[in-house]
Every structure is written in structure tokens, then in C-alpha cells.
Image (tube, rainbow, N blue to C red):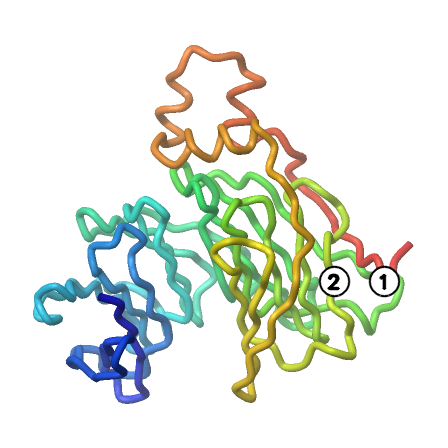
């Protein structure tokens, strides 16, 4: 059975049967607007919700929503939450904090913070398909630097790579705010929606974008997601429209596929205990790229 969850301004979450459009039941508990809804990838009909009431709630839909766990401790509205591919961890972002919170979905306890500077605002996050990397999008406040993406190891809280925008040749084109980001299903690319009407596709480790939208065709986009079978990115707009963008296909390397399969079930701590060469360990733990990278807009910077 395929379910759809929708969050309302009054804090209620409605569960629908997709095949018939029938409203099945309501989930009640949040005291304010529901901002985020994520089903866990393991198929257990577990729903994670984030709200302006500063809490995360985990719902067991097999018991008609009666089972609910509450994760509290955020300093502001929860504006983004993501579940790791193995359904062991939740990453959450709140509106008035400069930290990402990591929670255990197995013990329903707080794990750690990923801290950022006070001059930045965090807008979104996403786990790589193997769960070994957490990408966090942020932007500078008070006319400071533009947007940036930090890639973290969620197991060790180590910052792996920082990606910064570097379109400085035309200051008015410099994108200050990053709206959202998401990994492609194969983990090769990271899609970014930034202001000034830009959807950009970054291949990990490169200093140019693989794809950039035409500025005349991109307006008011707020979110994006990949088709499960690659090749298409869907974006949602502030005025309620959806657009679809074709992505040039790329075949993953055998080494990338091996890393993705291994890291899905092996944590960083377990990887470091293996008796393998240091160079191979760096590749398997995503520590084989420069820690700081700047990207250049192909259309405006040469």
C-alpha cells in the first residue's frame, strides 16, 4: 500500500491512500506548522516530521499513528530533516541555530552537533546514498560571504570538503543564498538551488558545475529532487509549479560503485579498523579530495 503524508498549518499530519485518494487518518501532536515530512527508507512505514514547535516526531503508521516519539532540544523552528539511507540516523536543521543536530533513530537519542560560524545560516542538508557523507548548505549573513556547501562525515563529525561559490567577476551575479540541495541516487552529483534563479549540478571533486540552468528559464525555485532512475531533476516553485530538467547521463566508475556498496553497511570507525593501505582508506572514507574547493560559473567566469 502506498501512503502520502501532508502537513498542515495547525500541526496536523494527514495520511492518504494514494491509489484511491482516501484520507485514512490524522496524526496529532505538533503544536505549530509542519515544515518537513520524511518516510524512512527501510520500508517500515515510519514517518519523521519536523515542525515550527521546535520538535521532531517519529510516527509508526502501522499502529495508526498512536506510537509517537518526540525529539526535542532545537532552539528554533525545524526547517529541514533527513533520514540516513540505512534508517539509523536523522539530521535536522532549525531556523535560528547555526548547528545541525544528529539523532539516533534506533535509540531515539541525541548524538551530536555539527557546528558552524555565527555569521552563517544553515538552510538544508542531505545524506549521500551510502550514508557516509552529509552535505549541509549555508549562506553568509549581514552581507558576508555567499553560499557554501560543507560535506561532513556524520560518524565522526569531521569536515571533509568545503565547496564555495566563486562568481566574483560580476558581483551582481554572485549568489548569496542557497535554497536547498540533494544528492543524485548514485551519489555522483549534488544538485543546488541558489538565488538569482540558478539550478546547478556539481560533480564531487570538480571545480566547475556540470550543469547550470539558463537564467531566463529559472524563476522562484525552492526545492529539487532527482528521479529515482537518474536523468531528470524536478524543481518546485514558490508559486506552486513543478519543472523538470534533463541531466546528461554518466556511468559511475567501478571504484565508486564498490565504495558506495561497502559504505552503506560499514561505518567510518569500522573502516579505520580494516588492515588496508592508507590511500585506499582515504578513498573509502571520502578523504581523498582537497578540503577546500571553489566552483566557477561557466557562463560568467572564465
Q: CA distance from mark 1 to mark 2?
A: 8 Å
In percent of width and height, residue 230 lies at 55, 54
Query: 160 above or below 104?
Result: above
In percent of width and height, residue 192 lies at 61, 61
- Mark 1: give few (<14), some (14-19) or many (20+) Cα within 10 Å: few
In percent of width and height, residue 166 lies at 78, 56
Q: Which mark is residue 299?
A: 1
Query: 272 above or below 171?
Result: above
Comes first in the chain, label 1 or label 2: 2
In the figure, residue 169 lies in which quadrant? Answer: bottom right
Label 2: which residue? Answer: 212
Residue at position x 44%, y 39% in the image: 132
Contact, mark 1 vs mark 2 (Cβ under 8 Å):
yes
Q: Is residue 67 left or right of residue 241?
A: left
Query: 133 above or below 219?
Result: above
Residue at position x 55%, y 56% in the image: 117
SS under mark 2: strand
Task: Report the number of numbered marks.
Answer: 2
Q: Is residue 240 left or right of residue 213?
A: left
**Looking at the figure, which quarter contains the C terminus?**
bottom right
Residue at position x 50%, y 27% in the image: 284
SS under mark 1: loop
In the figure, residue 25 lies in which quadrant? Answer: bottom left
In percent of width and height, residue 270 lies at 35, 24
Amino acid at each position: 500500500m502506498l501512503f502520502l503524508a501532508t502537513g498542515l498549518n495547525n500541526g496536523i499530519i494527514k495520511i492518504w491512500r494514494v491509489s484511491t485518494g482516501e484520507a485514512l487518518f490524522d496524526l496529532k501532536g505538533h503544536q505549530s506548522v509542519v515544515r518537513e515530512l520524511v518516510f524512512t527508507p527501510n520500508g517500515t512505514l515510519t514517518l519523521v516530521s519536523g515542525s515550527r514547535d521546535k520538535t521532531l516526531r517519529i510516527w509508526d503508521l502501522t499502529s495508526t499513528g498512536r506510537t509517537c516519539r518526540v525529539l526535542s532540544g532545537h532552539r528554533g523552528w525545524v526547517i529541514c530533516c533527513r533520514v540516513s539511507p540505512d534508517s539509523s540516523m536523522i539530521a535536522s536543521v532549525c531556523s535560528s541555530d547555526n548547528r545541525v543536530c544528529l539523532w539516533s533513530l534506533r535509540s531515539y537519542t541525541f548524538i551530536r552537533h555539527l557546528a558552524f560560524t555565527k555569521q552563517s545560516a544553515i538552510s538544508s542538508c542531505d545524506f549521500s546514498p551510502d550514508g557516509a557523507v552529509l552535505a549541509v548548505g549555508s549562506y553568509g549573513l549581514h552581507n558576508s560571504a555567499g553560499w557554501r556547501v560543507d560535506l561532513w562525515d556524520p560518524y565522526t563529525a569531521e569536515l571533509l570538503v568545503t565547496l564555495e561559490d566563486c562568481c566574483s567577476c560580476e558581483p551582481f551575479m554572485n549568489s548569496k543564498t542557497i535554497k536547498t540541495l540533494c544528492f543524485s541516487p548514485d551519489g555522483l552529483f549534488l544538485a543546488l538551488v541558489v538565488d538569482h534563479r540558478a539550478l546547478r549540478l556539481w560533480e564531487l571533486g570538480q571545480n566547475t558545475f556540470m550543469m547550470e540552468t539558463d537564467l531566463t528559464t529559472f524563476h522562484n525555485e525552492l526545492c529539487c529532487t532527482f528521479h529515482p532512475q537518474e536523468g531528470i531533476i524536478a524543481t518546485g516553485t514558490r508559486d506552486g509549479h513543478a519543472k523538470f530538467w534533463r541531466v546528461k547521463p554518466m556511468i559511475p566508475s567501478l571504484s565508486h560503485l564498490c565504495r558506495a556498496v561497502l559504505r552503506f553497511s560499514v561505518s567510518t570507525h569500522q573502516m579505520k579498523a580494516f588492515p588496508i593501505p592508507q590511500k585506499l582508506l582515504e578513498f573509502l572514507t571520502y578523504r581523498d579530495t582537497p578540503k577546500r574547493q571553489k566552483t566557477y560559473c561557466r557562463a560568467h567566469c572564465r
